[in-house]
Image (tube, grey):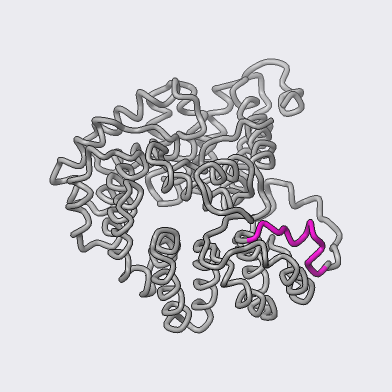
């Protein structure tokens, strides 16, 4: 962090290009973090290290607010999410109304900008954003209300009566994205007082509202509500994977397996097996292991099947030397530079290539430890205590699964947010 500001001798005495660099670096690092939140090789410690690097750039910007804001204004013209995140943090921490309005206006131009602003609001201490979240929740602009609800979910902070008022308003319920976010918040924060609104939303026609309502009902303890996800889970669409994943965790095992079989056979020839593998990992039944071992022989499915095997059994392929060792290409130092384009994420990219023969041999020696029909997460039967431990220490994809299991099994536990900053350094 000291290195990030060592060249600044006094605020606002030139160094304009230096502040442009800080903004670019912060934006680039945030983009890496936003991708890392769903990457299989990032632990909370890895995220904390990346977040400390972002903090270093933001601290440098805070040393000369005027120069920092001029650089942020130029960066906002790019209309990119990383620049929106950095400018939003700088603006809100300045407490300057005009700067905050400028950042919000730039963010709300695009869905990626909104996500970046939500991330910025989740990043900052409450003293910089709580009053603004209250303003957004009471704003006449429905987009502001939705923004505030998303930020509350990301921060893990219940909007309380503000959420109740939104669900009572007909104009808010008429807006699909706002209505869905409000119903989602009711489930995330286990708002049993809002159960009548959730029940009403389960009759909605919009898929976003329908999924949010059934998810909320399930989080509040009504596992039978998963049957209402059947159309979303078995037909291609925006919510298919999420509905299939949730259903696999709460339906009776036989019904969950029926869903997986239907999707495997019915979905697109390339996507069906991938959906089935992901749902099998969510179900956690070791009876799927022989099929997963077969999938490891397919180049298109091998890495994903290896990840599912790990999620069920807790056997880490790299640690146990159960994967193929690929040659390491020389590392290009420019990959850590902000001017280097960040490639589109490939969900299999950072997964190891399993050696199916070695994995099969190991499975034969350990399969007696696993009971068919029992659900497992990282080698142990699913429980609230175990899920909490995985959420606190696991890799990101397993943390996501564990957070959901934790919330499903612990009546008083809100659905934990992966967007919150780490505190493990």
Q: Is residue 371 above or below residue 401?
A: below
Q: Residue at x 38, y 27 (%)?
A: 98
Q: Dominant secondary structure of the magenta stretch?
A: loop
The quadrant of the rendering that contains the C terminus is top right
Q: Please give the range of residues in magenta.
A: 313-324
The quadrant of the rendering that contains the N terminus is top right
Is 68 colored magenta in this rendering?
no
Percent position of residue 316, x then y? 72, 58
Q: Quadrant of residue 127?
A: top left
Q: Residue at x 28, y 31 (%)?
A: 160
Residue placed furthest toward the left: 170
> Which of the two residues, 337 or 373, is positioned nearer the viewer here?
373
Q: Residue at x 46, y 84 (%)?
A: 265
Percent position of residue 192, x then y? 26, 40
Percent position of residue 273, x then y? 53, 77
Is 319 colored magenta in this rendering?
yes
Q: Is residue 135 above or below residue 144?
A: above
Looking at the image, residue 411 sits to the left or right of residue 175; the answer is: right
Looking at the image, residue 154 sits to the left or right of residue 11; the answer is: left
Q: Is residue 346 visible?
A: no
């Amino acid at each position: 962090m000291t290195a990030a500001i060592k060249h600044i001798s006094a605020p606002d005495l030139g160094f304009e290009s230096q502040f442009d660099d800080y903004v670019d670096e912060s934006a680039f690092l945030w983009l890496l973090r936003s991708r890392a939140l769903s990457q299989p090789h990032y632990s909370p410690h890895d995220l904390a290290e990346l977040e400390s690097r972002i903090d270093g750039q933001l601290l440098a910007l805070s040393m000369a607010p005027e120069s920092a804001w001029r650089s942020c204004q130029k960066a906002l013209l790019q209309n990119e999410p990383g620049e929106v995140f950095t400018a939003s943090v700088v603006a809100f921490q300045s407490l300057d109304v005009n700067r905050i309005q400028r950042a919000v206006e730039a963010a709300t131009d695009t869905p990626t900008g909104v996500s970046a602003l939500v991330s910025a609001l989740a990043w900052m201490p409450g003293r910089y954003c709580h009053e603004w979240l209250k303003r957004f929740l009471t704003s006449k602009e429905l987009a502001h209300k939705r923004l505030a609800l998303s930020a509350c979910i990301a921060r893990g902070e219940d909007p309380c009566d503000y959420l109740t008022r939104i669900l009572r308003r007909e104009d808010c319920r008429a807006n699909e994205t706002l209505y869905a976010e409000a119903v989602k918040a009711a489930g995330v924060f286990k708002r049993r007082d809002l159960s009548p609104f959730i029940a009403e939303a389960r009759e909605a026609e919009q898929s976003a509202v329908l999924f949010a309502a059934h998810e909320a009902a399930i989080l509040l303890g009504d596992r039978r509500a998963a049957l209402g996800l059947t159309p979303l889970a078995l037909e291609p669409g925006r919510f298919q994977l999420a509905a299939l994943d949730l259903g696999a965790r709460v339906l009776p095992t036989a019904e969950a397996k029926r869903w997986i079989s239907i999707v495997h056979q019915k979905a697109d020839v390339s996507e069906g097996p991938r959906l089935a593998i992901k749902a099998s990992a969510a179900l956690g039944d070791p009876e799927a292991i022989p099929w997963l071992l077969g999938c490891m022989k397919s180049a298109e499915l091998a890495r994903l099947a290896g990840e599912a095997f790990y999620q069920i059994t807790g056997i880490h392929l790299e640690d146990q030397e159960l994967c193929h060792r690929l040659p390491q290409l020389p590392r290009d130092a420019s990959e850590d530079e902000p001017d280097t384009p960040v490639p589109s994420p490939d969900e299999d990219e950072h997964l190891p290539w399993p050696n199916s023969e070695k994995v099969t041999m190991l499975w034969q020696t350990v399969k007696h430890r696993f009971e068919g029909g029992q659900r497992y997460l990282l080698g142990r039967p699913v429980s609230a205590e175990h899920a909490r431990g995985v959420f606190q220490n696991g890799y990101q994809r397993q943390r996501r699964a564990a957070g959901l299991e934790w919330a499903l099994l612990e009546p008083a536990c809100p659905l934990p947010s992966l967007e919150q900053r780490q505190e493990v350094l």
